[in-house]
Amino acid sequence: MTQAISQLLDKTHYFKGLKCKECGAEYEAKAIHVCEYCFGPLEVNYDFSSLRGRITRQDIEAGPNSIWRYRQFLPVETNDPIDMGTGMTPLLKSHRLARQLGLKNLYIKNDAVNMPTLSFKDRVVSVALTRARELGFTTVSCASTGNLANSTAAIAARAGLDCCVFIPSDLEAGKVLGTLIYGPTVMSVHGNYDQVNRLCSEVANTHGWGFVNINLRPYYSEGSKTLGYEVAEQLGWELPDHIVAPLASGSLFTKIYKGFREFVEVGLVADKDVRFSGAQAEGCSPIAQAYRENRDFVTPVKPSTIAKSIAIGNPADGAYALDIARKTNGNIESVTDAEIVAGMKLLAETEGIFTETAGGTTIAVLKKLVEAGKINPDEKTVVYITGNGLKTVEAVQGAIAEPFTIEPKLESFERALERAQTLDRLEWQPSLV
Amino acid sequence: MSVKVLIPTPLQKLTNDQATVECQASTIADLLESLEANSPGIKARLCDDQGELRRFVNFYVNNEDIRFLEGKSTALQDGDEVSIIPAIAGG
C-alpha cells in the first residue's frame, strides 16, 4: 500500500492539457496561449483526483526548499526542473507596520528577496523555462517592464538557453543593467509596455521562440500559484483571511486564488473564505476604475506612473481579477505616485524591507483600505511584496534624507548628531522609544 | 480604402496560412464584413453573438488601440495597417 502511494506521488505530472478559460475548448499542452474559437486565454488543466487525500504536508515539507516542493501542482513533466532556489521567501509577521496601521494580524510575504533576481518573476520564469526546454525551444524571450527581463535573462543563462528580451526604452537603469549582465540580446523599444507586448506577439508568430509571457503564458502564469501555496504552508497549513497584492495584468492575483483553491481541493488545507484586495497606481488603474464604476469589463488606459513594473494599460486578466475581488468581498484601490513613495518609505522604516514601486503601491493601498475600515484589524492579512527597491532607486531619490557629511573629528560628529536629533522624526516614532 | 490586416496565428487557418491580407474597408465594422467575405467563419471568432468584438480581442489601427479611437466605427484610410492581437499577459 505504502509502495502504491509512493508510486502515485512519483507520477511525474498531473496536468492534462490546456483549456480555454472562456469557452472550455481543450488543447494539447503545446506552446499556445489563445483559444482558436473565442480568443480566450488558455489555462493549464489538471486532474488532481489521484492526489486528493494522498499527498501530505510531510511530503511537501520533505521536498526542496524552493517552488519545486510543489512540483506535482506545476505544469512540467521533468523530475529535474531548473532550480535556482526560487521561492520559499520569508513570510514575516509584521509588528511595527502593523502597529502603525492598527492591525493585529499582518504578515508580509517578501519576494523582494526571491532568487535569483529579487522579484516574484523568478517563480513564473523557472516554470516557463523548464517547460520551454521540454517543448524543445532553444531561444526564449519576453516582453518586460524590467523584472521579467532580469529573470528571463538570468534563468536562461543558467539553463544554457539563448535569450532575447524586449523592454520599453524608458526603463529604470538598474533594471536594464540587471538584464544586460547575463548577456542576452536586449531590444529597447520606443514605446510603452503595451506597445512592446504587441510587437512581441507579432515576433512570436514568426520566429519560433518561446516567449514566456506569450506562447508559454499558460505554463508561466502557473508559477504564481506558488505564492499561494507558500503562504498557506508558512502560516502553518492554513489560509489567511485577507490578501492584498499588486495588480498589473491581474495574473498574479488570479493565480494566488487558484493556488489556495487547489490546496483546498487536494485536502492540504481546510476551506475558508479568503478576501482578495488588489492594488494599482492611479496613473495606470484600469482595473480599479472598472471596480469603482461597477463594470465587468476593463477599458484600457495609457500609463503614466512611477510604478513602471505594474504599468500595464491593457491588462489581460483584468476581468478575472475584478471577478475575484468582488466574489471574495475584497476591494481594488489605487494610490498616487506620492503615496507610492510614502509606502516604500513606510515599509523600509518599519520593517526593514526595501521594496520597489509595486511594493510601495501595495503598502499604500493596504494603508488606504485600513483607514477606510475595509480591513478588520483582527483579520489574518497577508500583503505581497513582489520586487526589490534597489532596482528602482530613481523613484525615491529626492524623497529620502541626505547623509551628514562630516570631518573625521569627534567635534564634527557631535555637531552633526545634535543637528540630526533636532530634525523632524516620524511623528509616531517617539512613542515607541 | 485598401488596408493591410495582420492576422494572428490562431486565425491563420482561416486565411490559408497568410499572416497578412489586403482588404477593402472604410471602417473597422466594414473590415469585419470584408474579412468574413474572404475568409468565411472569421467574424464569429472575433465577435460574440451580439456582433460585438470579443473581450480578449484587440484591434489596432496604425499602432493605436481602437478603444482609444472610435471603436468599431474607426475610419480607415488607404494604406492603413490593422493588427488583430490577442490580449497578452504581464511582465
Image: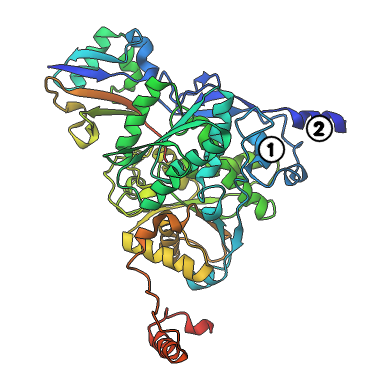
Q: Residue at x 36, y 53 (%)?
A: A307
Label 1 and label 2 in one chain: yes
Q: Amino acid at mark 2?
A: Ser
> Dot 2 lies on which element?
helix
Decide which of A405, A25 is in the foreground and name it.
A405
Write down the chain letter for disc 1: A
* Residue farthest toward the front in the current orientation of the protein: A408
The residue that label 1 is drawn on is A266
Residue A138 x, y percent position in the rendering: 51, 25
Decide which of A122, A185 is in the foreground and name it.
A185
Q: Amino acid at mark 1?
A: Val
Residue A6 is labelled as: 2
Q: Is residue A51 left or right of residue B11?
A: right
User: How many residues crowd around disc 1 within 10 Å: few (fewer than 14), some, or many (20 or more)?
Assistant: some
Which mark is nearer the camera, 1 or 2?
Answer: 2
**Cα distance in 3D space between marks 1 and 2:** 16 Å
Count how many numbered circles sit on residues in the image. Answer: 2
Q: Earlier in the sequence, mark 1 or mark 2?
A: 2
> Dot 1 lies on which element?
loop
Q: Is residue A231 left or right of residue A167?
A: right
Residue B5 in view: yes
* Residue farthest toward the bottom in the current orientation of the protein: A411
Decide which of A354, A223 is in the foreground and name it.
A354
**Picture quadrant of residue A339:** bottom left
Residue A302 x, y percent position in the rendering: 26, 44
A384 shown above or below A349:
above
Image quadrant holding the N terminus of chain A, namely top right
Decide which of A327, A385 is in the foreground and name it.
A385
Write down the chain letter for disc 2: A
A322 shown above or below A234:
above
Q: Residue at x 32, y 10 (%)?
A: B15
